[in-house]
Image (cartoon, helix red, strand yellow):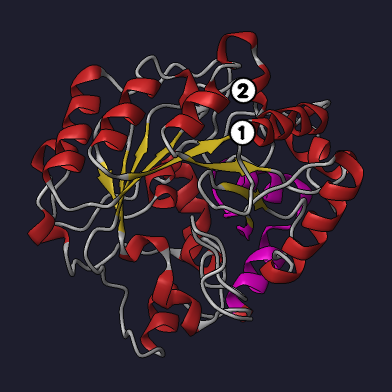
Amino acid sequence: MTLATQHSHPAEPVQQMKRLESLDLSTSFEAAIATTPLGELRSTEVQTLQINVGKRCNQECRHCHVGAGPDRREVMPDEVVDACLSVLCEREIPNLDITGGAPELHPRFEEIITTAARAGRHVMDRCNLTILTVPAYRHLPRFLGDNRVEVVCSLPYYNARETDAQRGDGVFQRSIEALRMLNEVGYGRKDGKSILTLVANPVGAFLPAPQSCLEDDFREELRKRHGVEFSRLITIANMPIARYLDWLDRSGNTDRYMAKLVSSFNGAAALSVMCRNTISVRWDGALYDCDFNQMLDMKMLNGYPGDIFAFDGALLHGRRIAVGPHCFGCTAGQGSSCGGATANQ
């Protein structure tokens, strides 16, 4: 079964956490991780500051774990932007990961990038592609290339039917147009100077195909059908939160999907999940172990900094990470993180 065509706002985070906790799973995530060499999930040093600059988006994707859309009004205020940039520039954090919503809609998007780039940070823009085809933003491909920003863009599949089923009618063709725009300014070339990363996630209640095989398929099909090139492809599992959890419930797939995640638990995949080296900042400045915990409003455990204004790298290094049933989504099969698969299947 593929994703339904209905758009909706997801249930509130508290309701979704209660729903996940009510599931009759064969084991808890804490018990599963205890069987691995890690014993429990703890962080390493902070390598990536991931900032969610708001939930405004020009799309309303049916799988969206953020619940973003055109009518959302959450936007990161200036004082939080300034604090994020101060933390990034004053500490040895090598990567800035900008997400949303459509992060390009934030009024200080370009300033954030230029500030981080001048500080020598590697910047990633999590782009939905279609925003680049909007007249007011058609200059962005060249701007991003000039600042050596890695564009990490969503493309569930190389066919229109599957992509549009998940992201909306006509999105595939607009995405291809945006990819061509990026290619025209140097993205996707073999020299590796302008990195174009595609993100594929399943269009339904199943795990991603092996990342390396899917990359080969995408490369061949996009090149042959559309003349599009890209640098690499990563796969991400659909997380059982926000709109996707609502869809699982509506379609009667929740128990089956969660059972699949639990039975596919891979201890090796847990070694490189994003929460171990990433700090996630909500639009209002609150800190979370990861983007998924953020969407469930699962705060960091007691004793750790609560917001970007209290950022303390020493306290955050080695912290115990808050976990729940949704964490099986990052550790199933080949694993799934913001950087794609975390282990060989």
Q: Is residue 100 above or below residue 70?
A: below
Position of the C terminus, as image quadrant, is bottom right
Residue 307 visible, this angle: no
| Residue 128 numbered tag | 1
Residue 308 lies, in percent from the top left, at: 18, 39
| Mark 1 in CB contact with mark 2 (< 8 angstroms) | yes
| Residue 271 numbered tag | none
Quarter location, residue 336? bottom right
Residue 318 lies, in percent from the top left, at: 18, 70
In the foreground, 123 or 27: 123
Q: Which residue is mark 2?
A: 131
Position of the N terminus, as image quadrant, is bottom right
Q: What type is the residue that disc 1 sits on?
A: Asn
Q: Residue at x 38, y 29 (%)?
A: 53
User: Magenta region, mostly helix, strand or loop?
Assistant: helix
Q: Residue at x 73, y 55 (%)?
A: 202
Q: Is residue 240 found left or right of 279 in the rendered image?
A: right
What is the CA distance from the residue labelled 1 to the residue labelled 2?
6 Å
Q: Residue at x 57, y 70 (%)?
A: 24
